[in-house]
Amino acid sequence: MQKSIIITNSDKEKLIQHAKSEEPYESCAILIGQEIERGWKVIEVFLTENTEKSKINFTISPQEEFKIDEIAKQKNLEIISIFHSHPTSEPIPSNTDKKFMKVNPYPWIIYSGHTNIMKAYSLDLELNDISIDVV
Ligand SMILES: [Zn+2]
């Protein structure tokens, strides 16, 4: 079954602006929300720091992820997706991304600053695309 991530246009724009402002480095964010029948609904976006300051990798500090997880729990929500950008390449998970997707088994959203396309993936669904529905 095709699953989808429901996100508001303003949250999507927030992610794109963050990606543009962090260039030439990769940017990242954590999305909290709810699991719904057909996928996930984004309630809030937290822009995070890429502690690697790298053009081809990103790392979110465990402390920052922990803090966001705590905020989510207080709101009866959960982390539902990890976002990052590829400033100069396609929005396709790299081998490093795939490795970390196993550790962080959320849907991952990747935005390409090169093609301006945003796509979502999940290892559970064997990397079949998850649709991103902007509302
Ligand atoms: Zn990547």
Image (cartoon, grey):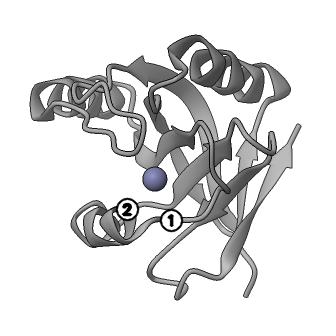
83 w.r.t. 23: above or below: below
Residue 125: quadrant of the picture: bottom right
Residue 97: mark in rendering? 2
Q: Position of residue 59 (x, y in %)?
A: 25, 38
Q: Please name the amino acid that badge 1 sits on.
A: Pro
Q: Quadrant of the N terminus?
A: bottom right
**Badges 1 and 2: C-beta atoms under 8 Å apart?**
yes
Query: 47 above or below 100?
Result: above
Report whether 134 appears left or right of 62. Answer: right
Mark 2 nearby-residue class (10 Å; few <14, some 14–19, many ≥20): some
At label 2, which amino acid type do we have?
Asp
Could you tell me which quadrant the C terminus lies in? top right
Coordinates of residue 54 in the picture (x, y in percent): 33, 32
Left or right, 132 with respect to 91, comes to right
Q: Is residue 111 left or right of residue 75?
A: right
Residue placed at 70% from the left, 56% from the top? 119
* Disc sitting over residue 93 in the figure: 1
Residue pictured at 40% horizontal, 45% vertical: 56
Disc 1 beta carbon < 8 A from ligand 1?
Answer: yes
